Image (spheres, rainbow, N blue to C red):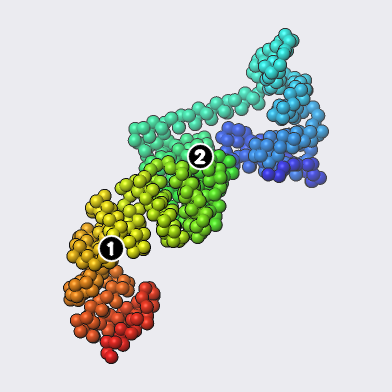
Amino acid sequence: MTEQTITPLIAPLGNADGILEEARVAHEKYLIRQQETDLEKAIECYVDAIKTNPTLSESYYRLASLLLIKGQISLDGALEQCKTALSLEPDNPNAHIYTGYFQCLNGNMEEAEKEFSLAISEAGKNSARPRLFLSKVLLNRIKSSHHSFKDVAKFLYYLLSGSVMIMWDCPSLKMFYKFLANDFSVFSYKALGETFEKMKLFPSALEAYSKGLEKTQQGNLFYQKMGDLSLECNDIDSSLECYKRAYELNPSDRDVLIKLATISQTYFPDNIDITIDYYNSLLEFGIDLDKIYYELGHLYLKKQDKIHAVSAFKLAAELNPENPYYNNSLAYAYVKAELYDDAIEYYQQAIKLNPDAEWTSIVCHALGAIYAEIKENYEAAEATFNAGMVLDPNNIDIQLSLGDLYMAQNDLDRAIKTYCDAISVDPLNFLTYAKTGLALWEKDYLEESIVAFHKSIELNPDFEISQNNLGVVYLDGFGDPKESINYFKRAIEINPNYTLAYFNVARAYQAIGDKSNAAEYYQMTLDLNKVTEELSEKDIRKRIFDLFE
């Protein structure tokens, strides 16, 4: 951040005292309530007071303390503002106190001691605060180096005298009373609301928090409590609204921001950009950055923003390279971006880390699919699928993919065996029977193929592929076109856009000599194929022509 400095300006005098008093009130509220809105208001008023009357020394050192809290100036910048204040009013004890405080933070204890001593001499009987500050400086000196009896005596003198004189320090007593009154009021309403919550009297708890908000104006705290309560009652909209108000009052409250991001991501999945903004704001705190980048990566994937997804996951993996989930997600993002070599590298890293056998088996499946479908490296794909099956013998999906790999290589025996192994693991999986039936059909085991397809349909009557394939067995295997038509039509009923089923029912009508129905279904196939592009248009037209040749 760039430093913000305030220098005296030549401006017409106006109601500077009124603006300064407004700044003091906002400053006091911030000290009590710790709400960002009060801090911003105080800064704005101090700046306005300086612009209106550049000779008001109080505006400079008080503004410096607030800008330091905001991180908008450094300690050297704060000391410069105090120097300006002292040049305007050298005898101002508060200016010396602030200067001494900033020197302490800067590690210049000797300079801090000088400033607090000057503040004591200038403040007289109201010097309780600089005496206590000076006693702290002396205590640090005693702790950090060899000290004399004089140092100890001096420390005790300023500590005891400051403690006694605080009773005559009206501004300090006033602030102490306000802090005490506010803390007691906050504690009372908070405790009452929590008691009602424990008793499951949620409306009463909400009312207690609302009254606490009204009486104390401690919005950040009570809006959070109301948000937590609304979330517990599953009133997501109210919860989100309360957290938003709490965040508006104090944007530096990381816990509220986390709640906003989590609720937005969980309950409002369409508000991706808003959720991304919340997570980007969380990055500014510099805490758990890898986790935040990980969540951002998933959000960018939902947006189909592949470049930002890869960048986010990569940052997460760089911050925590031993996290297998980050490596897996980065690999998946690379797949989406069609950067398959990079995907292979990070899938391999995730598998190597192997946090859980079942999870790693799924990663092996993803990696094997790249080898098989993209790289056409069947040997690597088979090895990877087998490794996944060793990790999790119950992973049906990886067994089916291994069977598909054998089918692609026309190794029907191994394909059938693999599919049958999958059936033994999960005998109620309709897809395993469908794939087994196809492999048996390719092997010319017609009876066995019929049994497998019937079982697949029994388990899932709405799986159109099994309906169609069973029809093909009856039509082309057993030469029974009438029986096949029922299955083709059922497949079309399930999926009206199933081009191949229209084509097959046309073939069946052609086989029984029903040229009219055959032509009708070939024409429907032709029309639908213009959209799906599953079949050769030339072949379909030739079949229509052959009907009436």
> Considering only vertical position in the picture, is 175 above or below 69?
above
Q: Nearer the viewer, residue 537 or 423?
A: 423
Residue bearing mark 2: 255
The answer to whether residue 65 is seen in the rendering is yes
- Mark 2 neighbour density, 10 Å: few (under 14) some (14–19) many (20 or more): few
Instruction: Point out residue 42 in the picture as x, y percentages from the top left corner.
Output: 65, 39
First-in-chain label (1 vs 2)? 2
Instruction: Point out residue 400 in the picture as x, y percentages from the top left corner.
Output: 32, 56
Q: CA distance from mark 1 to mark 2?
A: 57 Å
Q: Nearer the viewer, residue 318 or 368?
A: 368
Closest to the camera, between mark 1 and mark 2, is: 1
The amino acid at mark 2 is Asp
Q: Residue at x 68, y 41 (%)?
A: 72
Q: Residue at x 69, y 29 (%)?
A: 105
Q: Residue at x 32, y 61 (%)?
A: 411
Q: Is residue 94 left or right of residue 521?
A: right
The amino acid at mark 1 is Ala
**Tag 1 secondary structure:** helix
Residue bearing mark 1: 439
The answer to whether residue 261 is seen in the rendering is no
> Considering only vertical position in the picture, is 122 above or below 516?
above
**Tag 2 secondary structure:** helix
Q: Residue 543's quadrant in the figure?
A: bottom left
Q: Nearer the viewer, residue 34 or 494?
A: 494
Q: Residue 434's quadrant in the figure?
A: bottom left
Q: Residue at x 65, y 39 (%)?
A: 70
The N terminus lies in quadrant: top right
Instruction: Point out residue 68 in the picture as x, y percentages from the top left corner.
Output: 68, 37
> Considering only vertical position in the picture, is 35 above or below 167?
below
Q: Is residue 542 left or right of residue 81?
A: left
The C terminus lies in quadrant: bottom left
Furthest-bottom residue in view? 549
